[in-house]
Image: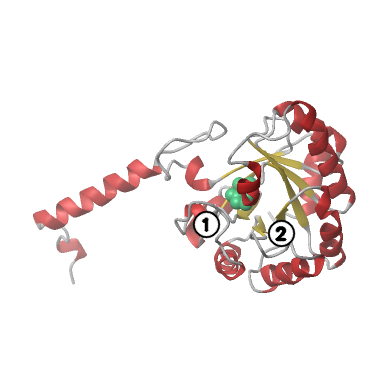
Amino acid sequence: PGRVRIHHLQQAKDQGARFAMLTAYDQYAAQVFDEAGIEVLLVGDSAANNVLGHATTLPITLDEMILFSRAVSRATTRALVVADLPFGSYEVSPQQAVESSVRLLKEGLVHAVKMEGGADYADTVRALVRAGIPVMAHIGFTPQSEHALGGYRVQGRGDASRRIVDDAVALADAGAFCVLMEMVPAETADAVDAAVRVPTVGIGAGAGTTGQVLVWQDMAGLRGGRQATFVKQYADLRTVLSDAARAYADEVRAGTFPGPEHTF
Ligand code: KIV
Ligand code: NA
């Protein structure tokens, strides 16, 4: 099968089908997910937390995002690769957003960018679309604003639902090819999905969106510790890796590795 393109995601929405999206930050994860048929790979700024060991997504730089983006893009043949615009790389002006996004496509080799922000960023979406850069909008809980939002909290409950729908409509009207929602009630996500023609993606947004996304180390159980409510763990990689490391160390200490078959 050829490359997944944004019109395939639109087709999914139009036909009532669904697609899967996972984060990826390096070659082998990207290769495995690409081969497994994951339609969209996100080089998330969550690399800050999941690769670089930061407490939030805020410290990651555009240069760091480009490095991860190149690794992921070069490892895929089929998935649509989307990279996050990191905090500080797009807020100043539409021009800044275009310049940063051009670098993500030109140097990071990705196919599209994702940007956090509501209706206030419609002009920025328009500038990106004008430059030929597909943009995925990220609304609801936006981790780059966690200090303003008072931590990880569900957005768009009750009366606030209206604002999330308005954000989605403004961004889709501006030309966003997809609207991603994080940590919003399912009813709000469903209202957004009904209000926009473009496909939607959810994380902690219920089952009504066109696609779903998870951070791969959460999905595969590599991260350890307490998982968010919206995460489902499909493997226990942390135990698999830990067992492998212990078995290796035991054999090294016992003198049974390397064996004759590993020796020249
Ligand atoms: O950076 C990230 O991991 C995200 C999520 C939507 C998965 O933006
Ligand atoms: Na992100």
In which quadrant of the rendered image does the C terminus lie? bottom left
Three-letter amino acid code at the position of disc 1:
Ala
Residue at screen point 61% across, 48% down: 147
Q: Residue at x 71, y 62 (%)?
A: 111
Residue 128 or residue 153, whichever sits in front: 153
Residue density around tag 2, few if under 14, some if 14–19, many if 20 or more, within 10 Å: many
Q: Residue furthest right?
A: 173
Label 2–label 1 contact, CB within 8 A: no
Q: Is residue 210 left or right of residue 45?
A: right
Q: Where in the figure is residue 142, as x and y percent of width and height? A: 66, 46
Image height check: is 90 above or below 10?
A: below
Tag 2: amino acid? Val
* Residue 175 point in image, percent of width and height: 86, 54
Query: Is residue 2 rendered to the left or right of residue 262?
Result: right
Quadrant of res 72 = bottom right
Q: Please name the residue that numbered disc 1 is placed on.
A: 48
Residue 60, percent from left and from top = 56, 62
Eye-nearest disc, 2 or 1: 1
Q: CA distance from mark 2 to mark 1?
A: 17 Å
Residue that label 2 marks: 113
Q: Is residue 256 visible?
A: no
Q: Split into 4 quadrants, where in the image is the N terminus?
A: bottom right
Look at 71% across and 69% down and name the residue there. 100
Q: Position of residue 70 (x, y in %)?
A: 58, 68
Q: How many labels were placed on the picture?
A: 2
Regarding mark 1 in the picture, which secondary structure is present there? helix
Q: Nearer the viewer, residue 52 or 72?
A: 52
Residue 252 visible in the displayed image:
yes
Q: Horizontally, is 109 left or right of 52 in the view?
A: right
